[in-house]
Image (cartoon, helix red, strand yellow):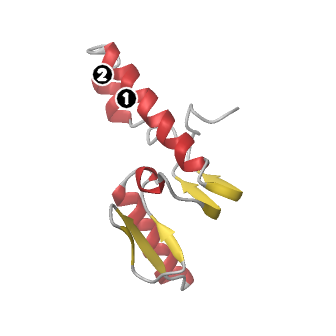
Amino acid sequence: MADGDMAGRVAADLETRHGITTATLTEDGPQGGGEVHVGTMHRFKGLEYQKLAVVGASDGVLPRTALVEKYATADPRRYERGLNKSRNQLFVAATRARDALRLSRHGRPSPFLPG
């Protein structure tokens, strides 16, 4: 997931609508005994999963609209660093999947995804 709020919404949806228990990934590892680990893309670094889903791979989320609006013209170097960081986080998250990877989005896809 791109951010903690989205991760929380996904975990709540899995549990309340689908009866799937979750564990939240924190800097100290998974918290809770749920069968599905939920966290931001940053939290998946260094881990490996048989199956992984990246939720929210949408334009405006990856990269953040605020990054584009705030730095695109005001600070082009910082803008490029932010784009690279977002792109790298998606790459790292996607490469945590050993056997299967699913990407979901709403609206337009992230410009980091292949056409």
For label 2, the crowd category at 10 Å Cα-Cα, with few meaning under 14, some 14 to 19 and many 20 or more, is some
Task: Give how far apart the Cα atoms at labels 2 and 1 are.
Answer: 9 Å
- Disc with the residue nearer the chain's start (2 vs 1): 2
Label 2 sits on a secondary structure element that is helix
SS at mark 1 in the image: helix
Q: In this view, does 94 lie to the left or right of 1?
A: right
Q: Residue 15's x, y, as percent? A: 48, 81
Circle 2/circle 1 CB separation < 8 Å:
yes
Q: Which percent across, then down, holds residue 59?
A: 50, 37
Residue visible at 64% across and 56% down in the picture? 97
Q: Position of residue 99 (x, y in %)?
A: 73, 59
44 in relation to 109, above or below: below
Tag 2: amino acid: Tyr
Label annotation for residue 82: 1
Q: Which residue is at a point 60% across and 59% down the rendered structure image?
A: 53
User: Could you tell me which residue is drawn at 30 percent across and 21 percent down?
Assistant: 71
Could you tell me the amino acid type at mark 1? Gly
Q: Nearer the viewer, residue 45 or 85?
A: 45
Q: Residue 71 carries which label?
A: 2
